[in-house]
Amino acid sequence: MAGPADDKPNAPTAAKGVTPKASVRPPAKAGPKSLIGSTISDRYKIERLLGEGGMGAVYQAEHTLMRKRMAIKVLHPEMTRQPEVVARFEREAMAAAHIDHPHVVTATDFGKLEDGSFFLALEFVEGKSLREVIAPGRLELGRALHIARQIAAALSRAHTLKIVHRDLKPENVMLVEREGDPDFVKVLDFGIAKVQIGELTAGDVGQAGPGQPVLTQAGMVYGTPEYMAPEQALGQPVDARADLYALGCITYEMLCGVRPFDAESKVALLGMQVTAPVPPMATKAPDANIPPEVEAFVKRLLAKEASERLGDARELIEGITAVMIQLVAMGRIDPAYAPPPASRLGTNPAIPSGFGPVPVLEGVQASPNTGAVPPKPGGGILAGKAWMIAAAGGLIGILVLVATILIVLKGHEPSTDGEGGIATADDSGATVLLPPTSADQKIKEAIAQIDSGNYGTGIEVLEGVGPDAQGREDVHRALFTAYTKTGRPVEAMREVGLVMKANPDIDLLTPSNIVLRQEVRNTALLEGQPSANKAAVEEAWTLLTKHLGYVGLDDLYDIAHGRSGMTPGYQKARDRGQREIAKADRSKMSPALAVTVELHAAHNSCGAIKALLERAAEKGDERTLAVLKPLTAPRLQGHWKKQDLLACIHEGSLKQAIADLDARLRKK
């Protein structure tokens, strides 16, 4: 399913117009090793084979004039007869040449050999792929965030140029040693990138000009299923947010040691990317102790809808920066990994959307390339002492400030004005009345915190307000969001029930309420999964069967007999759904669902089915039609003389009911 992207290494593509030919000495023989010892384009001496794939080979070479090591990708001669493969090779050359960023492998030359093969000269990087690094297990928290932040920086530069990678995965991320940082990131392999650079836009999806190839037809799926965004898995157009989804998968894997979704079948895996809820990290790595703020931004990157992910890689960089600074101050990660508040990666010490407040620490020098503070040579783990001092100094300053305020207030013996305000004195000695902070104001501020992504603070305030927060729909909606984003599914499910209780007339069919339904349904679908939070799953089933009204019962039917339950891996949820819908109160169902469920219950009872046909034609919907149509086939029983169990409706009444229902539905 991954398509051409899985053939490694990816090959260069033919340039438009005249492509320069490169001389090769001696003449090439068949096979990838035949180039070893030769000089191509009069300046690249091929020294050794680094790797080979179905499309081409990669060599280590030396630039004979500059005495500099290079990596040379060569497309197999037979692949030049496939225009799309050649075009993808050119696409990689364009992308790598234009991005020009410290965290992206740079292309410096492109040409054609005498045998028709194309070659691409790339910056030589020597290190380990991220796949090799995470193969033994999950990474330390600070290290994982340090790597993720650099990948985001590479994506930010590419996206600025309207280049979307579309096949980001650990195999395409190299970690090299640079300026004392052993985890300096280099992103490579833009072979299936979506490129829009000046006039090169013409070769992009659905935008090819006359005589130019369309490199990815609508509906085609390219990439690697394990890291593929839902819209990419569905063959839909993608933008930069597809790369952010892939980075979410990679970050999840670095932190947990396993991917969020895995299945033996690639088709099943793609289905999980499209529909399956993101497993809480605690279920995948119980001992990892991942902070809620980190899990929250990873989960946001993995949102099924592209519109619900972060806006761009720049916002992600700022968010990771904020989280890392907070974690350094808390002692959760080594200061050597933490970035300063402002760096060449473009971080902003202001509060970034979706991540929470950023404490500003002064006096820390940024690395000139990444803005990170890697361990310096010989410094080891203690190389980040400047961060420790800065963090400690900041904390001491805060403590001194708090102590000073307490002393001043104690000296003034502040009094209340009888209405909840506090009377104190300003610098001139005049009495100043500080207005009281009402519960309503606290609630509004807490909801604003949650809306901005500062979930922990918002939860803490709302949980501490007390009775004034109970029964308020806005409070329970905000808490639902915060609990969902921070991986607390039991509390999230309970808040859905409280939203319903606060507003019994809520319309669950409106777009703003779809998220409530989706979260309940997705949690119920985890029935029987070893990694599922059983208490949350039970809460979800209770909501579906008792508290979400006829809409909840519609979703329950979808699990039992519809599309949701058909998803591979959800058989236990499907089985339970069928049991639950069969015994559910039909008076609380829509008329269409009620008659559909009764038809299921009638099974092979011809008389019971016949008694329902008229109501099915009048009240039924597409679900009813899906139950009726299979009944047109005879249900034969008996060893010697076969009898049709449904003969009483095969005399014409069933076909008439189907025709009437179908005609009514067509008129809608």
Image (spheres, rainbow, N blue to C red):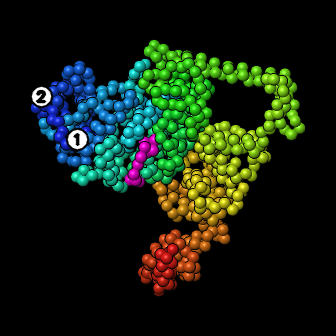
Question: In the picture, residue 176 is in which quadrant?
Answer: top left
The disc label shown at residue 25, or none: 2
Is residue 58 shown left or right of residue 152?
Answer: left
Q: Residue at x 32, y 52 (%)?
A: 207
Q: Position of residue 521 (x, y in %)?
A: 57, 55
Q: Position of residue 577 (x, y in %)?
A: 57, 60
Residue named by callout 1: 15
SS label for mark 2: strand
Residues 105 and 51: in front is 105
Residue at the extreme top: 378
Q: Is residue 123 above or below residue 193?
A: above
Name which residue type carries label 2: Arg
Question: In the picture, residue 110 is in which quadrant?
Answer: top left
Q: Residue at x 72, y 55 (%)?
A: 502
- Precedes in sequence: disc 1 or disc 2: 1
Residue at the extreme bottom: 651
Q: Is residue 432 above or below residue 558?
A: above
Residues 605 and 363: in front is 363
Name which residue type carries label 1: Ala
Query: Which span of residues is magenta-colored?
Result: 234-244
SS label for mark 1: loop
**The magenta stretch spans residue 498:** no
Q: Residues within 10 Å of mark 1 (few under 14, many from 20)?
A: some
Residues 479 and 139: in front is 479
Q: Residue at x 13, y 31 (%)?
A: 23
The disc label shown at residue 144, or none: none
